[in-house]
Image (spheres, rainbow, N blue to C red):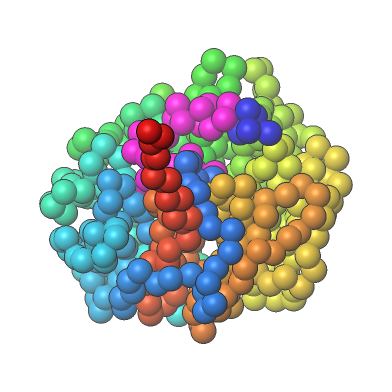
Amino acid sequence: MKIIQTILLLLVSFTNPICHAGDWPQILGPYRNGHAAGETLAASWPSGGPEVKWQRPVGSGFAGLAVSQNTAVLFHRVGDQETVEALNAETGEVLWKQTAPVSYRGTFNPNDGPIAVPLIHNNQIYTFGIAGRLQCLDLKNGKVIWSRDTHKEFQVGEGYFGVGSTPIIVDDKLLVNVGGKRKHAGVVAFSLDRGFTQWQAMQDDASYSSPTSAFLHGRYYAIFITRLHLAGLDPKNGNVLFQFPFGKRGPTVNGADPVVVGNHVFATSSYGVGGFWGQIEQIGTREIWRSEKPMASQYTTPIEYDGKLIGIDGRQDIGTARLICFDPETRKVKWEENNFGYATLLEADNKLIIMKTDGTLVLAEASLETYKELASEQIFNSTTRALPALSNGLLYVRDGKTLKCLKLGADAPATPEKTTTN
């Protein structure tokens, strides 16, 4: 299993930002698949839960943090300002702050703050605000290098909840789920250094799913879920390499990210859409199955573990949600925890870190055989939607008012003193 994971991580790393050890520089971590690299976690927590290293108030928004080179980047809204803050990852000390005015008001949901996780690459930060402001900042001092008003330039509507898709870097381009259907700019590529438009493709609205990437058959694929499609694009020029219908018209959204498993891709959504399993072939890509069983997740991206998928089936707002592990080839459920509640997941050190939307943090074994909970603690007493970030044994979690830095890493064992024999 370790060998398979290593191969997959190496393939994914070809098209993702260069990371330092312990970094969590983008949505779902260094490889954009929910797996942490080189982390060693404690197998249990002390009474009262994990140690709180520091905490601080935050503004509105559901954007999780990104962490690189001991700098944690917080993206939130304070008053009428979309605010990016660089924090010392170990102490929470503010290193710099950059703000930009925003007038967005939530309609279907009262949230008016950013949803997309910041992206850190080569000492630059890329953020995508809730009203479509795309910008590049200097990681060291917060200076604005460039910015684009994508909603205005590409004639994008507000959508149900504003912008919620984190951009990705592939082939030295910033690829963004813009949603400029009227301008044939569903997906747009921007240059990293100046923010110039490189290409634009697809007549689609945006989704709340963040893209991923893969290196298969000797080429790069940028894999997007838009409002109504699952598509693979050539990052060099925007040519659509494959495309399948995915999603439904009406009051629905696509929120979970696509998951690459070998040369296969899995997508999931709720609202009567369900799951999709396809094979990416050198010439064409074929659909293998689509069904609401076993997984139809509202916005949680499942974790691939030794070829199987672990994630949430259900919705946060209606009905019940279960935690399941299943084989995407056969659709057979390996194990399930019914009435588990809605949650987001990460994996590190063969353990699952599960942040439930009711504010409960859970540590469990990453297993294909059974569900085994190792620890659980109520961290927040409010709805918690933001994705956690794990860096150097520290977990960064936030609800709508507070950001906490929790110690999850195992302390290194003491080195025994050397003895000499006379």
Place of residue 239 in the rendered image (x, y in percent of width and height, measured from the top left):
49, 27
The reply, left or right, for residue 99 in relation to residue 308 is left
What range of the chain is rendered magenta?
Answer: 6-34
Q: Residue at x 63, y 33 (%)?
A: 2
Please name the residue shown 68% across and 72% down the image.
341
Q: Residue furthest front?
A: 422
Point 60% across, 44% down: residue: 258
Near-viewer residue (142 or 411) = 411
Residue placed furthest toward the top: 218
Question: x, y (%) of residue 260?
Answer: 62, 36
Q: Residue at x 67, y 42 (%)?
A: 305
Does 16 appear in magenta? yes
User: Which residue appears farthest toward the bottom when viewing the image?
Assistant: 381
Quarter of the image where the N terminus is located: top right
**Image mark count:** 0
The quarter holding residue 396 reads bottom left
- Residue 128 in sight in this render: yes
Q: Is residue 172 left or right of residue 409?
A: left
Q: Nearer the viewer, residue 221 or 56?
A: 56
Per the picture, the main secondary structure of the magenta-coloured stretch is: loop
- Position above or below: 168 against 236: below
Residue 175 in the image: x percent, y percent?
40, 39
Q: Quadrant of residue 58?
A: bottom left
Quarter of the image where the C terminus is located: top left
